[in-house]
Amino acid sequence: MSQRVLLHVGTPKTGTSGLQDVLFRNRERLLEHGILYPAERFDAHFLAALDLMRLPWGGLETEAFGAWDDLAAQVRAHEGTAIISHEILATASRSQVGRALESLGHRADGTGAEVHVVLSVRDLVRQVPAEWQENVKHRSTITFERFLEQLRDPARESRIATWFWGVQEIPDILDRWGHALPPERIHVVTVPAPGGPPDLLWQRFTRAFGLDGLELDLTVERANPSLGAPETALVRRINQAVNQRLEPADYRPLVRELLAHRTLSQRSRSPRLALPPDVHPWAADLCARWVEEVRARGYDVVGDLEDLRGPSASTAWADPDAPSETQVAGAAVDAIAALLLDNARLSHEEQRLHAELAETREALQRSYLRPSYRLRERVVGRLQGGRVGRAALGAYRAVRGRSSRSA
Amino acid sequence: MSGTPGEGRAWAWLDHLQAGGTTPWARWSAEVPTRGRVLPGAQQLELLRRLNLAGGVSPRLAQRVLGASAPGRGRPDLELVGATEVRGFGWAPVDPADLPDDELVRVATGLVAEDVREAAARASDPAAAAPRTARPVLQRVRTAWPWARRAPAYRLAGDPWLGSLWRRELAAAGRPPGGRAPEVLVLAGPLSVGLAHTWSARSAGVDGAPPWPQWLAATTERRHVPRPLDVAAVADRWATRVGRERVRVVVDLDRLPAVVDAPVRPQAPRLSGDAVELVRRVGVGLGLLVLPRARQELLRGVLVPMLHDLPSATAGPRLVVPPEHHRWVARRSVQVRAAVLRAGYPVLGDPDALVDAPDALAEAEGAPPSDAAVLDLAVALLRRHDDRGATSPATPTIPTTREDER
């Protein structure tokens, strides 16, 4: 059984993709130091989280059956430290948390594995626009204004509000995940305020996960980069145009990956998404209350809780619901260029495959022309012409056991 | 373990519910010392109370209910009002009696989905299978070797829900579809009924469907009727494969058994709109447990027969088209009949039966699915599965060919 389990349960948009990428690519090196990151594929922990929480996710859930139990079994079988990380775990219910902890070896009497919960957190001032953008990158067509209305509705009945508060309400997440654990086993990692050293967040993760002193390849291949206001507005318009016609399996590589992540995120000079000035005080006030709540609970804070208060209101706010059309047009030109280049690449690939197919067909034709094949073909044709012949052929194929029976 | 008086009251109420009690939370006053890790959510506790009101459940099912979380996205497990200290964050605690039925349906359908999967697994276990009723030898031979019968071969197309139900019934009667050079029978009826049937088939299908009002609104925004209901087009597609002379439109379903030479006269039972909505919602939960094709087989081969055995699932109100769509349906139904007559395929029954007259649509009796009725059905199913324990359900044998979508 793992002696120590580090369970990173969120929150989204706190550098989790980068962290998971580093852990995944360095898993063999980590194992040499007794640290298990159990993943055969990059999204293994995501699938396990879907399975634990029985969440549908555009068809990916069908790849997730039994994934949590498999993950937990690997953790239990490991002697040493194990790390599990996925941000959607933040929304797990109390009974799902109970099941997760138990499956990882936690025991209420303290005899089981030493489970630690890690929660990386960022202020709502930055998280709210980031979550709207994330919704847009998952096909949503909701405006930023409507999104904010739904979040601020005290009833929290909308689909967007239930998800947002489930993965972002820090004290509630810590209540659900930390209920059965002593406060010293709860680690709150704060995302540094804007403008800090670029590797400060990684240093904090390193401390929280006990990776100090390990030589890891920190090249991040998978990240979840952010878009500016006009770029997000463009993706929302694209969603409105293609949602009815583009299957989820096509949307993911084309819109989310090619357009949003690989193309539009490169446009760093456009205005960034931010809270409207009139909404900023609401978010800042909520953050201030969370800071006091988390401080009072005595958790291990990695970083500075003051980071959670967030930046001050933007003086030049750009409304993504009424963006500069010039900027949107610029983003659209970049998007068209990316699609053309990708189309050209696919076209070349298609030509190459056509050539390969023609070669294969030619080779097949040559084999058909062999006298032995033509003789067999004639015999089979003759036999199929009569009832007795068909029966004999059926018997022969049954004995031989070839799939050609149905041909 | 100590706790606040409110927590003690909540733990005592939990004990009461586990013992089969039915007192609502608002009228509960006794306390016991707190224990355990966390209290179940208000949704789980109220669902257990509803099950108790319906006659009670086994300790095993009670434990399953209390430990269940609703699958998919939605409100989390909620706290009981008065049981916990007021917090400045999180969802507001609730009186479970005030919860919308939809919240309880979310939890209940997740449990029904588990039951359906378990029932199918048990049915496929030969050791646990119930002894089959002996069928006449001739009927068994015909089922096993359709080509050995003398009756003409046939296939069913058109209305996907009717096709699914009749295939099952006719297969059980020893006259499964198939055989050499089959006659294709395109099942059809009034468009309003066909729409309800198509939604039913999609709800119990591979991909599932949105709720009836949304599905209907999206359908009537299009110019064309759903593909399986475009009777002439379905007949044309089959005609290109088997020849025009082997395609017939069947409007009068009472004559179907005679046409296919069924040795018995099957009566395909119908499901209420609430029952189909339950199928749809169980399908959502089942989609998180099995692959899409298996989900369809379990919904049609296990859940639908379970519902056929439940009187309230067959006696409830049927689905009707709401007034805002009457004009579209009436106009399109006239077009469907005209296309059939123009195409010239033989029609078994009166082609006028394909038409939805505006008066008839206005007078049709029925209701859209209601959460309360769906919850009642889910509670009844959970209790029935709980009672039956190891009883084997119907084996999922229903043919699920691609004809459904034609």
Image: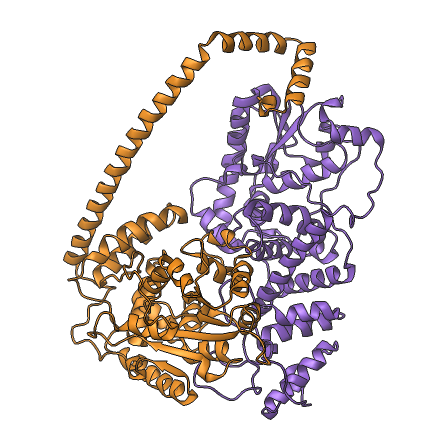
Left or right of B352? Residue A124 is left
Inspect this view and state whether residue A142 appears: no
Residue nearer the viewer, B260 or A351: A351
Percent position of residue A35, x then y:
43, 66
State whether residue A70 is above or below residue B187: below
Residue at image point 25% right, 42% down? A342
Taking the image as shown, residue B110 lies to the left or right of residue A340, namely right
Q: Is residue B399 among the parts visible in the rendering?
A: yes
Residue B221, percent from left and from top: 42, 47
Give the residue drawn at x 76%, y 51%.
B392
- Quadrant assignment for the C terminus of chain A: top right
Residue B156 spot, x, y in % from top left: 63, 32
Q: In the image shown, does B241 or B343 lie closer to the viewer?
A: B241
Seen in the picture, residue A209 relative to B378 is either above or below; the reply is below
Residue A302 position (above or below residue B342): below
Image quadrant in which you'd find residue B351 = top right
A357 relative position to B109: left or right: left
Q: Nearer the viewer, residue A57 or A41?
A: A41
**Residue A288's quadrant in the figure?**
bottom left
- Residue A17 in the figure: left or right of residue B300: left
Q: Color used for chain A?
A: orange
Q: How many marks?
A: 0
Where A143 falls versus A346 (above or below)?
Answer: below
Chain in purple?
B
Q: Residue at x 37, y 60 (%)?
A: A29
Q: Residue furthest front?
A: A32
Seen from the viewer's position, the closer of residues B236 and A77 is: A77
In the picture, the quarter occupied by the N terminus of chain A is bottom right
| Residue at image point 44% right, 83% down | A184
* Horizontal and vertical percent position of residue B110: 60, 61
